[in-house]
Structures are given as C-alpha cells and as structure tokens.
Image (cartoon, grey):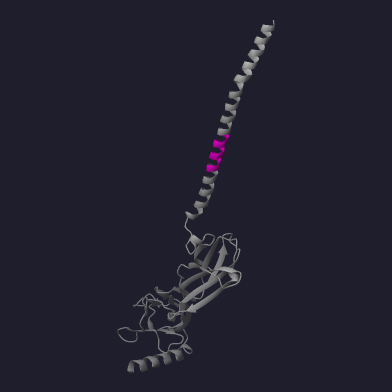
Amino acid sequence: MASCSSLFFVLFVFCFYSGVIPSFIEVACEPTTKAQFNHQSMLMCAVKPKENIRNLKIILVVWRKTGLENPVAVFDNRNTKPEYKKQQGYEFADHSLKTMNVSLLISNTKLQHEGEYKCDVMTDSGPATRTTMLKVTAKYNTPTVRSIDQKDIPNVHKTLICEASGGYPKGQLRWFDENKTEWTKSAKLTENKRNDGLFELSSELQLLTGSTFSEYTCVVYNASYDKEDSASIVVNNPSRLSKIKTPGSAIIAPVVVIGSLIVGLLMALLFFRRRSQRTHHEVSASDPGDDQTTIGGVNGKDSMA
C-alpha cells in the first residue's frame, strides 16, 4: 500500500513539474505499431536530448495504457538501485535504460493490449511525454467451401457456403466465378465475434437453376482489403461437389475429348478400308466375264471368216 501511495505521489509530482520545469529532452516514439496476435510486439520509444547533454540520467519512466487505472510498467531510478514494477506480460526492452531506449515490450500480444499508450519520462535535464498507438491484427484461417442442395427455395438448386475464422479486425469474404466475375453482391455475409475477440465469417451464395458456371472461388480479405487466402469448388459434376479443385482435375476433360476423337478416326479409317476392299473385290469378279465375251466375239469373227 505504501509503494502505491509513493508511486501516485511521484506521478503527481511528475505531472506538475512537466508543465513548469523547462525540458531539454524529448521522447520520440513510433506513432503507430501494428502487432500480430499471439506474437511479441514492441512500442518503440527513445529519449533524445534537444541539446548536447553529457551523462544524461533517466530518473523515472512510467508506461500507462488508456483505460487502465495502474501503470503497466515503471522504472524508478531515484534510489541507489533501480526498481522495476510491471504488470504481467509487460517489460522494458532495455532493463538498464543506459542507451536511452525506453521501449515497452509485450511478450504475447492479445486483443486487450490494443489501444493508446503514454510514456512519461523524467531525467536530470527535465521531463517529457509521448503517446503511441498499438493496433493488433490476426490472420484468418484458410477458408472452407461446401455445397448444399436446395429443394425448398424456388429457382435455387444449390447454396454455396464459405467459412473463415480466427481473424481480426473484421474482414470480408468475396465470391468469383471461373471468369473472375465477382458475385459478392448476390451473397449474404454473416460475422460472429468469438470469446477471444477474433471474428468468424460465413458467406452464402445461392445458385439459380440453370446456372452455367462450373467453378466458384471464395476469397478472404482482411480489414485493409488485402487478400489473405482462398478456396474453390466445382459445381458442374455432382460427384465432385464440396471438393477443392486439384491441379489434375483440369486435365481430365481434354484427355476424354482427345481419346474420343482418336477412336472416331480409327473407326472411320476401318470403315473406308473395308469399303475399298469390297469395291475392289466386285471389280475383280466382273473382269473374267467381260474377257470371255471379248474372246468369244473374236472367235466368232474368226469362224465367220
């Protein structure tokens, strides 16, 4: 209890003197830091003198997050031995602070870490303060696509369902056919926020009876409209519904067509060959009778002679 009272007194004195005592230093921070969910992140800040100051000494550093009553990290160098106070998951990147690096390290970033932070610094050359923002992002899992036959909805024979989860902030699912034409406006998007703050996305696309497109692709985009991942489904063959397209599937149709053409050519060649043989046989069979008639005619002339 005594330590808390002492800290609040120090903060009061800091706030008072920061507006009264002239300062020869400044705190330089990155305005915004983007952190990945479940990864380590760091709010980069450093103390910089405005003039050529030798042996600058940091006396006190207090990191606070907007919305929290108590500081998340404190460095107190007023006594002979520096003291550190920090909440779980927070720590100083440089414990000695001799390099003037007062950056705040977050070991395992969660959504509750997102927000505005304030760094207050007191030195033997005056105080300074700076605010910075931490934004947390999480990548969506690879989407899954499935198909459901529809019998109760008029003029609709199938519904395609695409699902993706584990992302933050809220993203979007978009639909495209094999010609890259977008069908997102015809789909219904549903989002659900999980207990951990991450989003689950689901999109339903109804296919009208007589639809001529054989393949649809569902693409997941993050909140910055950047493409993260995609999945496709083939709908023209019932035996292949709800299966992701594989590279070999595009080869099957051409092979079947080429095979059919070869068989047709072979049958045509066989037909013409048999017809040619039959014609040749008929001509050969008629030649002897004509020869006998000619010979008989010659003999007849000889007899008459």
Percent across and percent down for residue 178 are 56, 60
Q: Residue furthest top?
A: 305
Residue 286 shows up from this direction? yes
Q: In the depicted view, which residue is nearer to us: 116 or 263? A: 263
Q: Is residue 143 above or below residue 100?
A: above
Residue positioned 53% across, 72% down in the render: 203
Magenta part, dominant SS: helix
On-image quarter of the C terminus? top right
Residue positioned 50% across, 74% down in the render: 201
Give yes or no for residue 255 being in the magenta stretch: no
Percent across and percent down for residue 294 are 65, 15
Q: In the depicted view, which residue is nearer to us: 99 or 115? A: 115
Q: Is residue 179 left or right of residue 18?
A: right
Q: For the magenta stretch, what is the residue range?
A: 263-272
Q: Is residue 282 left or right of residue 255?
A: right
Q: Is residue 195 above or below residue 20?
A: above
Give yes or no for residue 267 being in the magenta stretch: yes
Percent across and percent down for residue 118 are 45, 83
Residue positioned 54% across, 71% down in the render: 204
| Residue 112 in which image quadrant | bottom left
Q: Is residue 52 left or right of residue 151?
A: left
Percent across and percent down for residue 46 are 43, 76
